[in-house]
Image (cartoon, rainbow, N blue to C red):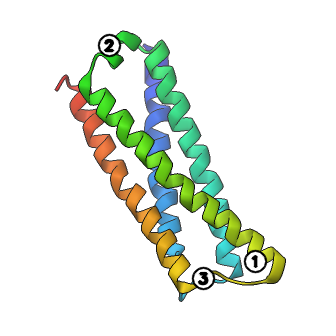
């Protein structure tokens, strides 16, 4: 029972951290605020966000493998598959902002150029998209955990 509580807590903390750090990235992605320091800050936030994603995935897998309900229960639930599909979609969406931020930092280091207004808006839209999908995943998890 203690392991289940620790894994559930880690999972929840990772979700909250993901929301906080992706929201911070979205808030900083504005043309009027973007400068060299903000581009580097976006990279730091992205590293923390990706660490949160890693904790979320590892704690989720651990819950499936070592959790009280067992992996057979999880894979037998239709909402589990819907949730995993949304998680995979979110991971694909998350990859683009991460690669974009790293490219911005490389460009900034190479020639001091900041991204265009169009690039900033595209990045912000991608961050906002995955940030808005995450609550649906959490709601699905609540319904699913209650046997819906």
145 horizontally vs 148: left or right:
right
Q: Position of residue 50 (x, y in %)?
A: 59, 48
**Mark found first going from the N terminus, 1 or 3:** 3
Q: Position of residue 64 (x, y in %)?
A: 44, 19
SS for callout 2? helix
Q: Is residue 116 visible?
A: yes
**Where, quadrant-wise, is the C terminus in this rendering?**
top left
Q: Residue 108 shows which numbered tag? A: 1
Q: Which corner quadrant of the image does residue 88 belong to?
A: top left
**Where, quadrant-wise, is the N terminus in this rendering?**
top left
**In percent of the image, x 45 and y 32: which residue is there?**
9
Proximity of marks 1 and 3: CB atoms separated by less than 8 Å? no
Name above or below for residue 75 compared with residue 145.
above
Q: Is residue 30 visible?
A: no
Q: Label 2: few (<14), some or many (≥20) within 10 Å?
A: few
**In percent of the image, x 48 and y 73: which residue is there?**
122
Q: Label 1: few (<14), some or many (≥20) within 10 Å?
A: some
Residue under numbered circle 3: 34
Q: Residue 66 versus residue 129: which sits nearer the camera?
A: 129
Q: Position of residue 13 (x, y in %)?
A: 47, 41
Q: How many marks?
A: 3
How far separated are the C-alphas under marks 2 and 1? 49 Å
Name above or below for residue 94 compared with residue 147.
below
Q: Residue 73 shows which numbered tag? A: 2
């Amino acid at each position: 029972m203690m392991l289940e509580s620790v894994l559930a807590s880690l999972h929840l903390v990772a979700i909250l951290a993901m929301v906080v750090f992706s929201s911070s990235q979205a808030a900083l992605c504005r043309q009027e605020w973007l400068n060299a320091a903000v581009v580097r800050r976006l990279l730091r936030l992205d590293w923390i966000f990706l660490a949160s994603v890693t904790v979320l995935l590892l704690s989720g897998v651990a819950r499936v493998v070592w959790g009280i309900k067992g992996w057979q229960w999880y894979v037998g639930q239709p909402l589990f598959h819907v949730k995993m599909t949304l998680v995979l979609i979110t991971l694909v969406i998350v990859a683009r902002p991460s690669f974009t931020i790293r490219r911005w930092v490389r460009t900034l280091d190479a020639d001091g150029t900041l991204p265009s207004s169009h690039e900033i808006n595209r990045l912000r839209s991608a961050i906002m998209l995955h940030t808005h999908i995450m609550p649906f995943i959490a709601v699905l998890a609540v319904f699913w955990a209650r046997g819906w």
